[in-house]
């Protein structure tokens, strides 16, 4: 479906975090820190600094380790899955000295980060009001811009960011990088520019040689006392309660009128959707709604889809004809509800203009949803038209933004043009 075929890369990962030196600052002697996290396909090896007499490790709300060792191997895990932990350091009197929370993933045996951001391991560690986010290397990207709640806060060359968050808040980090496309695609882009006589500035032309990568991490501290890292379990749903989400993916044309790049066509103009980003917009090119549920009757995933009507006009904007494309290019695949704590699926999309022979709007999204309330979405799409993705949970009253991308022009539907890759997960 997509514009290129990738090569298979094998990645090995050792996340060495927060390495302690022998000269530990006195004021940090009682601060619990992760020294390393090593994920395997079915295990996660955790090491932390030895500041206490004993330690407790929780996976979600379940105590899985209590002892004096400052390391623990969590085994019997599922490959390529998200896991959340809490570690407590306890002194000789039985008092909790410090604790931290972390989220990471097990590795996948056959993974290809370059083609699928769903394979990328992102680790988040929260201690007091300090957060660290660490991610695996992405081939060809050496610099990342870091946005916090939409504001640029840093540019980093290492795959780690450190920051502070506030209590009782939702904090969103967007880690953005650009990756130079390969020589074969670069040659195809140059040929496309020449054959279609595209008028581009040097900056615009340079942008055509990069795929954009966006890693979004949302941290919810609304149920955490950041002074103690204590989770208020009374505010959380029980493990047996129903957990459900509705995900909405919409493509739309923001302008009221869109010119046809094919000057030989009788359709010189098409009407757009004349709107901005909104989860509830009534006008769109395509819409896919996915319902995900850990229900008492069982686990389920279902798809509802719709395609907007296309209206064609001549050069004088005189109406000629309307048409509605088939929705058959919107479908679910790789649906797996066999795991009691995890639901996965892939949403595929390829829908074109019903009035003319035109390139499809292409996108894919891989979804992972967990019974503990965590989720991970990873997608790739053409950089036209506008794309918007929203999510609403069964305890929410409004949609939450997962991803938004403005159109860069209908020429970006062409096969050689760069795509947008994105992922979002919560903690």
Image (tube, rainbow, N blue to C red):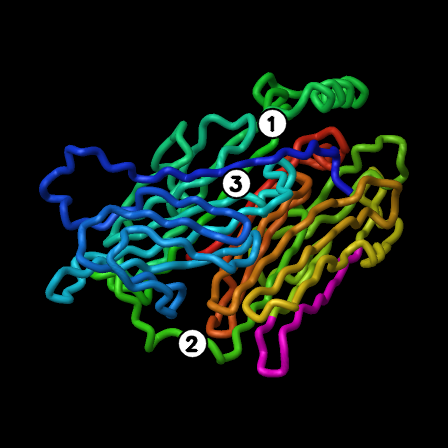
Report the residue marked by disc 1: 210
**Residue on which disc 2 sits:** 237
Image vertical order of residue 427 relative to residue 36, above or below:
below
Q: Which residue position holds label 3?
A: 214
Q: In the image, what residue occupies the spot 39% across and 48% down?
A: 149
Give the quarter of the image for residue 347: bottom right
Q: Which residues are magenta?
A: 293-309
Q: Secondary structure at mark 3?
A: strand
Q: Position of residue 102 (x, y in %)?
A: 36, 54
Q: How many marks?
A: 3
Residue 85, percent across and down?
Answer: 37, 59
Assess whether mark 2 and mark 1 are in contact (beta carbons under 8 angstroms). Answer: no
Vertical position of residue 303 compared to residue 126: above or below: below
Q: Residue furthest bottom?
A: 297
Mark 1–mark 3 distance (CA, rounded to whole Å): 13 Å
Q: Quadrant of the C terminus?
A: bottom left
Vertical relation: 113 (above or below) 301: above
Instruction: Choose mark 2 or mark 3, whichever is in front.
Output: 2
Viewer-nearest of discs 1 and 2: 2
Q: Earlier in the sequence, mark 1 or mark 2?
A: 1
């Amino acid at each position: 479906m997509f514009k290129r075929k990738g090569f298979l890369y094998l990645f090995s990962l050792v996340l060495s975090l927060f390495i302690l030196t022998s000269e530990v600052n006195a004021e940090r002697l009682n601060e619990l820190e992760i020294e390393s996290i090593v994920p395997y396909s079915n295990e996660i090896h955790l090491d932390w600094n030895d500041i206490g007499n004993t330690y407790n490790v929780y996976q979600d709300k379940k105590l899985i380790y209590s002892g004096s060792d400052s390391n623990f191997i969590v085994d019997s895990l599922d490959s390529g899955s998200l896991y959340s932990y809490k570690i407590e350091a306890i002194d000789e009197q039985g008092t909790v000295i410090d604790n931290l929370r972390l989220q990471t993933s097990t590795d996948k045996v056959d993974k290809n980060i370059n083609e699928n951001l769903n394979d990328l391991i992102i680790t988040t560690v929260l201690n007091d009001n300090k957060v660290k986010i660490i991610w695996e290397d992405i081939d060809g990207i050496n610099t990342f811009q870091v946005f916090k709640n939409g504001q640029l806060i840093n540019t980093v060359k290492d795959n780690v960011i450190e920051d502070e968050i506030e209590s009782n808040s939702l904090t969103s980090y967007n880690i953005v990088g650009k990756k130079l496309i390969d020589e074969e695609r670069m040659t195809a882009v140059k040929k496309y520019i020449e054959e279609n006589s595209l008028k581009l500035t040097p900056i615009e032309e340079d942008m055509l040689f990069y795929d954009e990568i966006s890693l979004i991490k949302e941290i919810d501290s609304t149920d955490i006392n950041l002074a103690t890292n204590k989770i208020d379990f009374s505010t959380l749903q029980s493990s047996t309660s129903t957990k459900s989400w509705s995900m909405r993916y919409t493509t739309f044309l923001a302008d009221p009128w869109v010119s046809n790049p094919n000057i030989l066509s009788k359709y010189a103009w098409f009407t757009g959707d004349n709107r901005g980003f909104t989860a509830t917009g009534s006008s769109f090119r395509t819409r896919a709604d996915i319902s995900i549920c850990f229900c008492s009757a069982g686990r389920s995933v279902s798809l509802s889809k719709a395609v907007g009507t296309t209206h064609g006009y001549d050069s004088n904007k005189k109406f000629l004809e309307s048409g509605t494309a088939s929705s058959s290019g919107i479908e679910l695949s790789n649906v797996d509800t066999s795991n009691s704590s995890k639901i996965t699926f892939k949403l595929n999309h390829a829908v074109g203009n019903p009035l003319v022979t035109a390139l499809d709007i292409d996108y894919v999204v891989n979804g992972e949803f967990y019974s503990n309330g965590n989720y991970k979405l990873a997608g790739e799409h053409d950089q036209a038209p506008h794309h918007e993705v929203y999510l609403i949970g069964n305890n929410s009253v409004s949609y939450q933004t997962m991803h938004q991308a403005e159109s860069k022009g209908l020429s970006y539907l062409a096969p050689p043009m760069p795509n947008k890759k994105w992922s979002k997960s919560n903690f």
